[in-house]
Structures are given as C-alpha cells and as structure tokens.
Image (cartoon, rainbow, N blue to C red):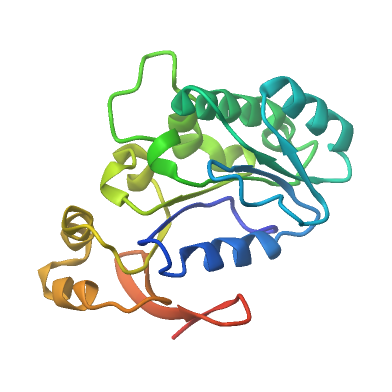
Amino acid sequence: MEHKQAERVFVCGRSGSGKSTIVKAMVRELKAPRLIVFDVMDEYSKDKPGWVRVTNMKDLVHTLKARWKKGFKVAYVPTGDLMAVMDKIAKLVWELQEGYEKGTDMRQFTLVAEEADTGIPNRTMPADMYGVQRLSTRGRHRGINVIAVSQRPALVHTTFRGNCGSQFVFALANENDRKQIVQTVGAQYADELRQMPNFRFWRLKDGQIQRGHTTKSGRYKLS
C-alpha cells in the first residue's frame, strides 16, 4: 500500500475461509511499515521476529516513540471495553500522522482491526468516540490505511463499511451477512455467494466484482 493514496479495506469471511491469508499478505507488502494490529485473538506476534506485543496504551505510546523513525510492527492485544480501546488507538494514530498532512513526513501508517465487529461494532457510538469514524472519512489525508477484518460483516459499523474503497468477500456462514453483501452486489449473485468455497473471494471495488483466490504459499491472486 505504500506509495499509493491511503486506503480503507474491509475483509470478511467465515472462520477458515482464507481471509487471514489475504490480510497477512497485505501486511507483508508494506515497506518499512508503521503498523498496528488490533489483535483481539493474540495471534500476530507469537513466534514472529520483528513484532512487538503490547497490552496497554502506555506501552503502545512508548513503543511508537522509540521506533518511530525506523518503523514498527505492533500487535496490540486489547482487554476490557474493546470499542473504547479501538477509539483510543484511532485517535492516537490520527495525531501521530499530522506530519503527513503537513507534508513533513510522507510515510503512511496502517491500522489492522481484527475481529472488527468488537472494536468497530454496528451500533450508535457515544459522541466522544469519534476516532474510527474520523479515520474512515478523513484518514487518507493523513496517510492512514485501515484494514478491518471480521467473520460478521453485518455486525461492523456501516460508516466504516460504506467508506471502504474495496472489500474482499470470502465465504460467509451467516445468512444475514450474505444478505448484507447481496444488497451491495445484486440478487443475481446470491447463489454464487452461498456456494462460495473456502479460499475463493470477491473483490468489490468501484461497483465491480473481481474474483480471486488465496494460495498455499500465503499469497492471493486476482482473476
């Protein structure tokens, strides 16, 4: 994603469908990354060199300050009110990326929100929890990429999903989730989505469907 306009991407699919493969492939593509993963399941940093695991905002701020110039890959393992934690991270990233908007530091930042239905749930946010919404609507001006990942697209906030430039849709287990996607692509695709096998996906962008698949080598290919 570096060297392009910052993006908002949504990846959805049932467990085992291949969505984690595509997200981790996107992460590997980043050069000298400034990367935070909202790592609800505590998966990203285990036995992986170069990752820093943190569990609170104090340690997160310390880590980012120490590694700001060289880049970093941070797995934030949240506890407590996950929506409130995500809001704090979003506000922090916004402030840190002020230099991008001013033209003094043009490196982008990437925030990956795993289990996005917990940190960006589809419900009314308190007035003071505007962090994610601001990234959704204005984050590109500060070079902030956001990749949200969920098994349940219907449970992820509509403001974020509506502002995504692209969506990667894998096989979905829940009928309500399939209905959400079919409302976007059209009823003529309902059977194809219902029968979609694991490791196959649609990429939805600019009103078009592009099909693809993930590979055993941990990559993804578009048709």
The answer to whether 49 is drawn above or below residue 73 in the figure is: below
Extreme bottom residue here? 223
Q: Is residue 170 left or right of residue 130?
A: left
In depth, the one of 90 and 191 nearer the eye is 191
Q: Position of residue 223 (x, y in %)?
A: 44, 86
Extreme left residue here? 187
In depth, the one of 213 and 96 nearer the eye is 213
Question: Residue sitting at 88 percent across and 45 percent down?
Answer: 70
Question: Residue sitting at 16 percent across and 58 percent down?
Answer: 175
The answer to whether 85 is drawn above or below residue 119 in the figure is: above
Q: Where is residue 55 in the image (x, y as percent from the top left)?
A: 67, 30
Q: Position of residue 176 (x, y in %)?
A: 17, 53
The answer to whether 116 is drawn above or below residue 171 in the figure is: above
Q: Position of residue 188 (x, y in %)?
A: 12, 75
Q: Is residue 45 left or right of residue 164?
A: right
Q: Quadrant of residue 169?
A: bottom left
Q: Quadrant of residue 157?
A: top left
Question: Residue sitting at 44 percent across and 22 percent down?
Answer: 130
